[in-house]
Image (cartoon, rainbow, N blue to C red):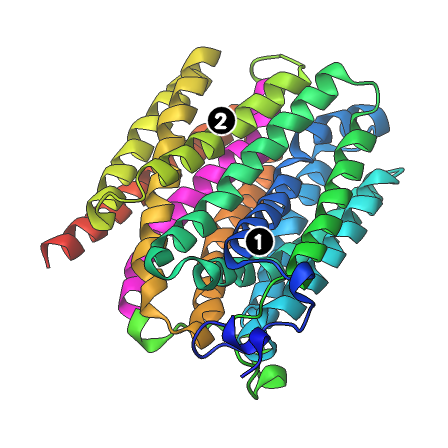
Amino acid sequence: MSTAEQTCPTGAAPAVRLPRSRRLRPAAAFTGTALAFVAVALAVGAPSPLFVLYQQEWGFPSWLLTLAFAIYAVTLLITLLVAGSLSDHIGRRPVLIGALALQVVAMLMFLFATDIGWIIGARSVQGVATGAAMSTFTAALVELAPERQKKLGATIGSTAPVGGIALGAFFTGLAVQFTAQPTTLVFASLALLFVAGILVVVASPETVRARPGAVRSLIPRLLVPRAARSEFVSAIPLFVATWMLAGLFIGLSPSIVHGLFHLDSGLLNGAIVAVPPAVGAAAGLLLTRAPARPTTIWAMAAIVVGVTIAGTGIALETLPLLFAGAVVAGAGFGAGFSAMLRILAPLAPNDQRAELFAGIFLVSYLAYGVPALAAGELIAAVGLLPTALGYVVAIAAASVVALTVQAVRRRR
């Protein structure tokens, strides 16, 4: 057996035949893949603090701002339906390389944008790239993780997108506040990160063996592996609650800060977008060893408490309360989503794992994008304050349902 074949996980395809000096060791491949996944999430959060600047500079109506936010979720969802399980058939590396190359294209479109049409186009390309990458990165991290630490792969897979969104929003906020050319700095840096990610993937081993059915897998569908179906269905309210929360802070919070608190600050916009996912990523990592089922229950309770505090802050126009609620709810977001992935990930074999994660992220991004798009329409009809408060109530209701479902499963 060749050296390259000896380095592969059991049942996986042989690693790419690079010279030993150019191949990544397993730990380096795992770390580099995790960082590339973080870069994808950085790019998701990065444009949010810039949208208000684009509107002020180009003078387009607010509904186009909402469209620029929502088009990302729509294209991501379509891609998940079409290509979410493609890597189960052709391998992780080809899908990841293609997705990262598309991310470079999207960053260049952002960089050279001259009107809102370019931004909408860039978000569309970014949605396709992220949809192709999301389930594949998460599956690859589980498979590249050390043999005795597979749950670490699931934890990193759930916290990387959350933490990356926070870092992207916050760093962009800093760039807006303290640099003369924030757009150039942000998107040129992200393009370089994606080029580095491509190099990491090229030098990493393949973790699944190619198998027939790649073309058939492109037929839009949602097929969850049989062993995971019961658990997946019970997790849907949790995914809805956590990602509706993400949509509130990533999609609407800059408008809330500007329209209700009458504050214009790139740093403040970046901070309010970043707080929930940053706290969520920390909570997910810190609670890796905590029992998963009880964690989901306490996490949903934290979201109910957090959005109640945040909603009070919005109603009273009290910014510290909004931030306090973001911290509490963000902890519930990260802890709950991470714990649920730890429950689900072991229920799928390697050659069906991307399909499982495609289903998870499909539900999650529906909850992330559709309510935010609806909120954009409601703002014009009923106003920003009633829309924001209604959004908060909907998140709390979904969290109560999720808490109840998880408590029942724990008793069983």
Q: In the rendered picture of this protein, how many numbered marks are placed on residues?
A: 2
Q: Which quarter of the figure has residue 228?
A: bottom left
Horizontal and vertical percent position of residue 220: 57, 75
Left/right placement of residue 296 relative to residue 353 reads: left
> Mostly what secondary structure, the magenta segment?
helix
Left/right placement of residue 110 relative to residue 320 reads: right
Left/right placement of residue 245 relative to residue 380 reads: left
Q: What's drawn in magenta, residue-wise? A: 229-257
The Cα–Cα distance between marks 2 and 1, rounded to whole angstroms, is 24 Å
Determine the residue positioned at 73% across, 21% down.
176
Identify whether 361 is placed above or below 329: below
Q: Residue furthest left?
A: 411
Taking the magenta stretch, the answer to whether it contains residue 387 is no
Horizontal and vertical percent position of residue 21: 67, 60
The residue wearing badge 1 is 33
Determine the residue positioned at 57% across, 64% down.
80
Q: Secondary structure at mark 1?
A: helix
The residue wearing badge 2 is 275
Q: Amino acid at mark 1?
A: Thr
Q: Amino acid at mark 2?
A: Val
Q: Which quarter of the figure has residue 200?
A: bottom right
Q: Residue furthest bottom?
A: 212
Depth check: give the residue in front, 356 or 399: 356
Which quadrant is the C terminus positioned in?
bottom left
